[in-house]
Image (spheres, coloured by chain):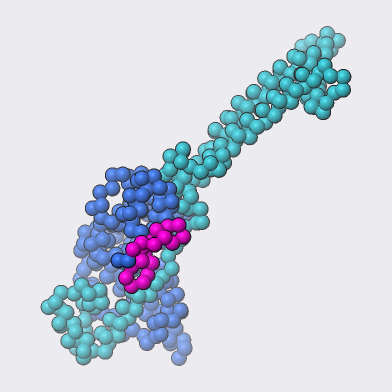
Chain colours: A blue, B cyan
Amino acid sequence: MKPCVLVGGLRKCKVLHGNVMSKPDQEMIRQILAGEKRALAELIDRHKDRAMTLAMRMLRNREDAEEAIQDAFVRAFQALPRFEWKASFSTWLYRIVCNVCMTALGKKGDLPHLALGEDDERSLDAPSADAPPDVEYESREFQSIVFDEIEKLPPLYATILTLFCIQEMGYEVIVEVTGLPLGTVKVRLFRARTMLRLAVGRRLGVRQSAAI
Amino acid sequence: MNHLTTREILEFVDGTILDGQRTHVIAHLEVCSRCRSEVEFHRTLVGAARRQPPHAPTRKFTDRVMQRILPKGQRRWIQTIMNNAGGVIAMGIVLAVLGYALLSSNSSASTQPSMITEMVKVCDDLYAKVQEFLKVQATKLESLSPKPRAIGSIKLILLTLLSLVALGAVDRWLIQPRIRARK
Ligand SMILES: [Zn+2]
């Protein structure tokens, strides 16, 4: 790694492939614990959008989601001196976000809706759906259809899909964040992706037949 | 032909498929265009989902979180003033009125009345009128005599202190709970 350079008053490190990478969370947390307010603001800015996306998928309401992540950040930073680095800071933070959102859903009586019953793995061993329609995958329209359909997924599936796709978490990290068993995470994620695939395929199919 | 299952396709796309199954999947994909396009479709879906714009909280989010996290002594001075706006305004009013009252007492000997003296006189007159109205229920009007200025000033000071207590109460029980609720 090349030596650190000062960029806009903040120390950032250049990595070998040329991208400018900001300080790792661990370094920023050390600075926060030493009383640096700027590091605190930077760490909040770094994680707030992803935390908000996760909370939005779970709660489906901007105000509730923002309140939930505000509580989650406060809890996380208050517990920061006791943080043990058994997981990354982001994993730990998103776990708190998940817990706060679950509590919020519980208060609203929406929890049964989120925690569906048995996760039947057998459906995943069935042959895949019909052949997908022939479309331009890179088009803006395709992107917007995918976005629409993710938003429409039930919160249970949208949450897992968000952790997997948007937060780019692996199964083990999703297990840590959600507290669900690995098998359940896999089944729910596969089902979420199958539901998304069917919904997007249907939308594209309708669009294609309309064009014909 | 038996097509690949959803699980096989997704595990293949994610690269988490076991080696034994991987060989079978690759062999099938070489001869089946339908499963090949299904694999491609799932890859594209994950790619498209990863490019989705995140939801962002409102603009002042970071400030609000910091305000809740940082100890009071570390908050910005402007936030401290804003949080205690009620008290600051009350103190300003009290100091101003006290200043007027004291200045008016000192300048009462002066032959030419200042503007401050005039203002205090108006307040005194107003107060005397209110007092008169209240007492008229119990006593005769002719038994009342005009109040000396010194006594009027003391009552004015007492009234200002009362207003300070009232403003302090409004700040503590009405304004501050609203500020806390907004956080
Ligand atoms: Zn096939």
Q: Nearer the viewer, residue B93 or B48?
A: B93
Say left or right for B95 vs A75. right
Q: Which of the 4 image quadrants contains residue A198?
A: bottom left
Please state which of residues B12 and A180 is positioned toward the viewer in this rendering. Answer: B12
List x then y, in percent, for residue B113.
85, 23
- In percent of width and height, residue A164 lies at 31, 66
Q: Is A132 above or below relative to A30?
A: below
Q: Relative to residue A20, is residue B25 depicted above or below?
A: below
Task: Residue A209: give x, y in percent of width and height.
Answer: 43, 87
Per the image, is A13 magenta?
yes
For residue A212, above or below residue A117: below
Residue A196 visible, this angle:
no
Residue placed furthest toward the top: B143
Look at the picture and state if A99 lies above or below B137.
below
Rendered residue at 70%/29% (across/down): B96
Q: Residue at x 31, y 54 (%)?
A: A26
Instruction: Give the left or right position of residue B155, taking residue A139 as reference.
Output: right
Question: Count the marks: how many?
Answer: 0
Asked if residue B168 lies in the magenta stretch, the reply is no
Q: Where, by quadrant of the figure, is residue B21 drawn?
A: bottom left
Quadrant where the image shows the N terminus of chain B = bottom left
Q: Residue at x 46, y 38 (%)?
A: B73
Q: Which residues are magenta?
A: A3-21
Q: Which residue shows up at 82% across the image and 11% down it? A: B144
The location of residue A81, given as percent across then percent down, is 31, 44
Would residue B95 be found to the left or right of residue B147 on screen? left
Residue B8 makes an appearance in the image? yes
